[in-house]
Amino acid sequence: MSSDSAPRLVIIGAGPAGMTAAITLAEQGLPVTLVDQNPRPGGQIYRFPAVPPMVPRPPDRGALLRKRLLELPDRITVLANHDVVGCFPNRRLTVCGPEGFRMLEADHLILAPGAYEYVPPFPGWTLPGVMTPGAAQQLLKSQGVIPGRRILLAGTGPFLLVVALALYGAGVEVVGICETLRRRDVFWNLPGLLTDGDLRRQGFGLLKRIRQAGIPLLIGQIVTRAEGSERLERVLVAPCDGDWIPDHGRARPIAVDSLCVGYGFVPRLGLAQQAGCQLICGDQPGGWIPQVDAWGQTTVPGVWAAGDGAGVAGSLVAELAGRLVGLGIAANCGAITAPQAEQLADPVRHRLTRLGRFRRAVDALGRLRPGLSTLADEQTLVCRCEEIRRHEIDTAVSTGSVTLRSLKVATRLGMGPCQGRMCQPAAARRLADLGSCPLERSGPPTFRPPLVPVTLGDLAGTVAAAGEDTRP
């Protein structure tokens, strides 16, 4: 296939899914443009470390994927340090990078933007020193900065263990991991958790290292409040039941200078929503994901989705999904035949099927419970951008605003710079837990360009023409 007739293939996000999709397409002789906001490929999970480790370590999956990308420079163009500002009809993208603001056009567009952490509003969650585990990990990996000296991690999921060990290895005093799940919750899902040998060994390995480090595991506990005068000084931790409803009468204080709190991940939907993709409601923190077929193509022809942005399932599933998308596009472009694509996809689908039961068990454990909606008191900020408190949300709900759209009209919820990324998942959960509106009826968030803040200088710079050939 000549370069003149090569299709324009653009991938957004250089995490596990995006890197794997790019490699798969390049291996089939197709040129690809890979766009990412970070200086190096890897995404959050495989973020390139700021400071090389003192003791050399075996290369992880991220290092192996980056190495393969570098081996295909004639077919893979990486646009690092580029933010996607918006997505427009006919798979057109506006991006902003070191060279300024410009437009990209794609015959096939792969959305692999990843996800971000879900934090329910609770008293004190806006204090300096309160952050997500991913933010702490990013500080450590990207800048070599520790976020505090005495840290508590709270929420649910194995990611807490990963970040706790990284902080401990950097010399931080990790005072504990506050996990809302109880032992009985894990017991009832144990058959599914034991189905995949590799992941089972990884899980037990993490727990063993936590014990060896002497990091306390506070099982069946939840952070109910963060306190401090000008920054975080202590948190209140209480036992919780199966619905994660805390027993405030048994709460106890723990002195800390940093709190890392996260209850799973929310898929980044901005690009899929702007592209016009059909969204479906799922039982996950964000509630909504793009609808895709067996190859990862959305309801919009030529727009594909993979990785956590199409449903949070972890880095291994993201890689496999990225390969399926790559094979599907390669067959669509004629680089391989449909039977060849099916043959190459068979082992990928087999692995995904094996991982399915394990994933369902993990999802059942991480399912958000109604107790999270009870943490915020009347004066707790729900929308940080617009400074809207919980009592304002409840007042609007009592007068008939029972969807995200009507709440936005009544209160300005989600109209700030983050466009509802932080507040709208929590507001939708609040509506559902109050019995006012189920998640599927509250509606997905809506996003408008720009998806990220841009300066007037960026907008005033040189803009490539919309019809310009942007093939690598």
Image (tube, helix red, strand yellow):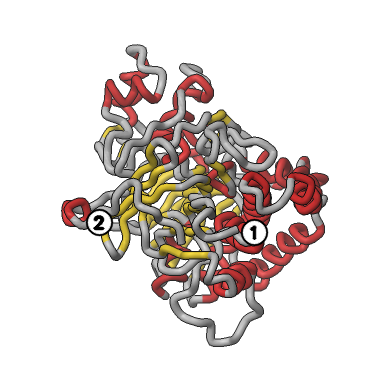
Q: Position of residue 198 (x, y in %)?
A: 78, 61
Q: Which mark identifies residue 24?
A: 1
Circles 2 and 1: CB distance less than 8 Å? no
Please state which of residues 430 and 117 is positioned toward the viewer in this rendering.
117
Q: Position of residue 236 (x, y in %)?
A: 44, 49
Between disc 2 and disc 1, whose residue precedes?
A: 1
Vertical placement of residue 159 versus 363, above or below:
below
Please state which of residues 210 and 328 is positioned toward the viewer in this rendering.
328
Left or right, 217 with respect to 238, comes to right
Asked whether residue 137 appears in the rendered view, the answer is yes
Q: Residue at x 82, y 50 (%)?
A: 195
Left or right, 27 with respect to 263, comes to right
Q: Position of residue 22 (x, y in %)?
A: 57, 59
Asked whether residue 214 appears in the rendered view, the answer is no
Label 1 CA crowd tier, 10 Å (few <14, some 14–19, many 20+): many
Q: Quadrant of residue 20?
A: bottom right
Q: Quadrant of residue 188?
A: top right
Q: Residue at x 41, y 32 (%)?
A: 445
Measure how far apart labels 2 and 1 are at the Cα level: 50 Å
Q: Residue at x 46, y 29 (%)?
A: 444
Q: Position of residue 229 (x, y in %)?
A: 26, 54
What's the residue type where badge 2 is placed?
Answer: Glu
Label 2 belongs to which residue?
A: 230
Vertical placement of residue 98 versus 350, above or below:
below
What's the residue type where badge 1 is placed?
Answer: Thr
Q: Which mark identifies residue 112?
A: none
